[in-house]
Image (tube, helix red, strand yellow):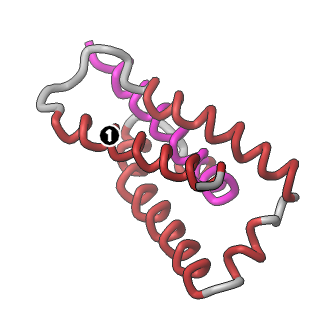
Amino acid sequence: MSHSELTALAGFAVAAIAMLLVAQTKQRVSWPAWLVPAVVAVPFAVWTGLAVVEEGLFGFWPMLMGSHWGLQVWFDRLICVTAAFFLLQNRARAAGMKSEVWVLVVIFTGSIGLLLMLARTVYLERKAQP
């Protein structure tokens, strides 16, 4: 197995475990929950930066456009980010965030911006509660 395959498999395992743990949580956590998306966004942003340095800003394009699977992954990403933004933006507005600014961040950074938006939303929601 190649280094990329192992990295992809490890990322899948971490995501699956995190989702299963979140699904099992029945009560609101007492620790600062905004740290979870913030901590996930940081290494992903670093990984993205390394990819941009190694492959260039549009290095992903040939990979995505090279096959039907590449396009399927691209559309899946777009659909997921759009759905997540749609579900999060009302909470973000209620917490006092400007959706116009965040939609630009999410459009240009994808999951990184979405994770940061989620972290900020959860932080502001927790801060507003007594």
Using the image, determine if residue 54 lies above or below residue 68.
Answer: above
Visible residue check, residue 12: yes
- Observer-nearest residue: 124 or 26? 26
In the rendered view, tell whether residue 78 sits above or below residue 10: below
User: Which quadrant: the C terminus?
Assistant: top left
Tell me if residue 124 can be seen.
no
* Residue 102 horizontal/vertical position (percent): 58, 48
* Image-based side of 78 in relation to 4, left or right: left
Residue 36 image position (x, y, % from top left): 43, 29
Q: Nearer the viewer, residue 76 or 9?
A: 9
Find residue 14 and report its image quarter. top left
Q: Is residue 125 magenta?
A: yes
Residue at 59 percent of width and 81 percent of height: 71
Q: Which residue is mark 1?
A: 17
Q: Measuring 36% from the left and 24% from the top, which residue is drawn there?
A: 33
- Residue 41 x %, y %: 57, 37
The stretch in magenta equals: 102-130
- Give x and y (percent) for residue 90: 37, 50
Q: What amino acid is at disc 1?
A: Ile
